[in-house]
């Protein structure tokens, strides 16, 4: 017995056989026989029932889209030897990929001779464009034990009822079963949004980290709230008026997050990444755009919807004003600014970078913070100014030395009271990336 394009032998169960199942599903099908070694010798299996169960579980858990419908696991006897045979049909929902790798070239395998090898990026693009006709959100969900408490809350806030009839009309239910769209909107949705803030451009130190799961609309709200905490205003006085300005427009933050959620490739087991730096915000969603568009085309509103049903729900809930307007609105918020947003569209990810309109430091922000608070904690100051703990401690120390604030309480319960007789008028602009202590000077009000 010899291995060939459609036949592979394994002496025993190993999770490496999942690569072969993926490769056969993406090519022309094949057979994997466990209990025969690479040289074709019949070694048999001691516990074929256990091996068969492990094969079924691995195929169900580690391959996306669902490959259990195109595979058959059986126990066979060859003389006195027990074997497990996995028959794999060519799949109709290509490309199939390893769940932990995601829909990337390194996670998609094809059959070349007697080997299962990763596909090239060009081959993956061709497979996605030419062979994948069924969208992820319309497929039947693996999980059917779904609840929708968070989704009902979102609907209730907009005075819209969520019942079985409406769920069916929105394509969350098909033939009596929940679709992946329902899974995406359920409390059990297990692909997250990861959020982090850093104290410099090189990600050398975390200020804060957070992660949110469940209904993707709830995740989106959590991420927007996270970003708002770092959108600290500064102020200037013009005549008798105080004018506040923000480093990021609320429109650009909201549109960038909605774009990430609406266009995310949910077939990839990867999180949306939200990163806050001293001078920018980046939002990266899994899956590049289905088709390539130039920036000019995107600014004109040209786009393709990966998740048409999800986008439709967001539109009905008033979260999206009109299809294709997200990118133009983001760039419109920077009209007149020297710094512009940046878009990076790759095979497996789409990134929007929002530059800060106040990238020169934290002096105005510190002044605004002190003017707006009678008392504060070190953690509140740290989060508002986007700095590390050690730097926030240094700033508080300088403020106390100069008499701008005084400590109230001790230990973890300590707070700082602003001295209203003095006003901080200068802080080192290099504070976020300088190891020196903050420099302040005070004048009488």
Image (cartoon, rainbow, N blue to C red):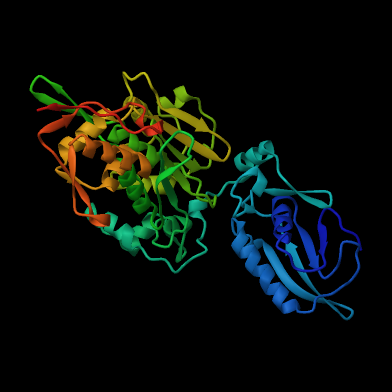
Inspect this view and state whether residue 99 appears: yes
Is 271 drawn above or below residue 123 in the view shown?
A: below
Q: In the displayed structure, does residue 119 sit left or right of residue 305?
A: right
Foreground residue, 192 or 188? Answer: 192
The answer to which image quadrant residue 121 occupies is top right
Image location of residue 38, percent across then percent down: 87, 61
The answer to which image quadrant residue 246 occupies is top left
Is 337 drawn above or below residue 117 in the view shown?
A: above
> In the displayed image of the protein, which residue is found farthest to the left?
240
Inspect this view and state whether residue 325 appears: no
Q: Look at 49% across and 35% down and name the residue there.
A: 202
> In the displayed image of the protein, which residue is found farthest to the front?
401
Foreground residue, 172 or 217? Answer: 217
Q: In the displayed structure, does residue 266 sit left or right of residue 95?
A: left
Counting every numbered tag in the picture gives 0
* Quadrant that contains the C terminus: top left
Q: In the displayed structure, does residue 386 sit left or right of residue 24?
A: left
Is 39 drawn above or below residue 334 in the view shown?
A: below
Foreground residue, 21 or 242? Answer: 242
Q: Look at 43% across and 62% down and name the residue there.
A: 188
Q: Look at 42% across and 66% down and name the residue there.
A: 146
Q: Look at 22% across and 39% down and name the residue there.
A: 400
* Quadrant that contains the N terminus: bottom right
Image location of residue 407, percent across then percent down: 19, 47
Image location of residue 93, percent across then percent down: 61, 52
The answer to which image quadrant residue 405 occupies is top left
């Amino acid at each position: 017995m010899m291995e060939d394009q459609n036949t592979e032998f394994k002496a025993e169960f190993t999770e490496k056989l999942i690569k072969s199942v993926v490769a056969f599903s993406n090519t022309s099908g094949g057979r994997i026989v466990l209990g025969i070694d690479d040289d074709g010798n019949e070694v048999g299996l001691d516990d074929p029932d256990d091996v068969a169960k492990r094969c079924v579980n691995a195929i169900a858990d580690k391959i996306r889209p669902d490959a259990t419908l195109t595979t058959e696991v059986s126990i066979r006897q060859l003389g006195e030897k027990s074997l497990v045979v996995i028959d794999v049909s060519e799949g109709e929902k290509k490309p199939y990929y390893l769940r932990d790798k995601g829909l990337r070239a390194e996670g998609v395998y094809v059959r070349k001779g007697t080997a299962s090898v990763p596909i090239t990026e060009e081959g993956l693009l061709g497979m996605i464009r030419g062979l994948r006709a069924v969208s992820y959100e319309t497929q039947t969900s693996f999980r059917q034990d779904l609840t929708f408490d968070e989704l009902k809350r979102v609907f209730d806030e907009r005075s819209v009822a969520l019942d079985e009839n409406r769920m069916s009309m929105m394509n969350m239910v098909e033939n009596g079963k929940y679709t992946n769209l329902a899974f995406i909107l359920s409390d059990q949705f297990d692909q997250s949004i990861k959020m982090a803030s850093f104290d410099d451009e090189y990600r050398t130190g975390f200020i804060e980290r957070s992660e949110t799961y469940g209904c993707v609309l709830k995740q989106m709200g959590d991420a927007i709230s996270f970003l708002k905490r770092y959108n600290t205003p500064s102020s200037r006085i013009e005549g008798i008026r105080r004018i506040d300005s923000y480093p990021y427009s609320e429109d650009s933050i909201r549109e960038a997050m909605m774009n990430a959620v609406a266009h995310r490739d949910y077939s990839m087991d990867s999180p949306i990444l939200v990163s806050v730096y001293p001078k920018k915000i980046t939002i990266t969603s899994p899956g590049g755009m289905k088709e390539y568009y130039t920036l000019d085309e995107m600014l004109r509103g040209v786009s393709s919807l990966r998740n048409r049903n999800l986008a439709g729900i967001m539109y009905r809930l008033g979260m999206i004003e009109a299809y294709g307007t997200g990118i133009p609105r983001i760039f419109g918020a920077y009209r007149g600014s020297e710094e512009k947003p940046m878009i990076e569209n790759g095979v497996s990810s789409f990134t929007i970078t929002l530059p800060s309109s106040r990238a020169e430091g934290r002096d105005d922000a510190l002044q605004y913070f002190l003017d707006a608070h009678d008392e504060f904690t070190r953690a509140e100051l740290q989060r508002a100014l986007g700095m590390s703990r050690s730097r926030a401690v240094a700033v508080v120390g300088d403020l106390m030395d100069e008499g701008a604030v005084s400590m109230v309480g001790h230990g973890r319960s300590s707070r700082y009271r602003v001295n209203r007789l003095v006003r901080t008028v200068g802080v080192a602009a290099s504070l976020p990336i300088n190891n020196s202590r903050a420099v302040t000077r005070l004048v009488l009000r």
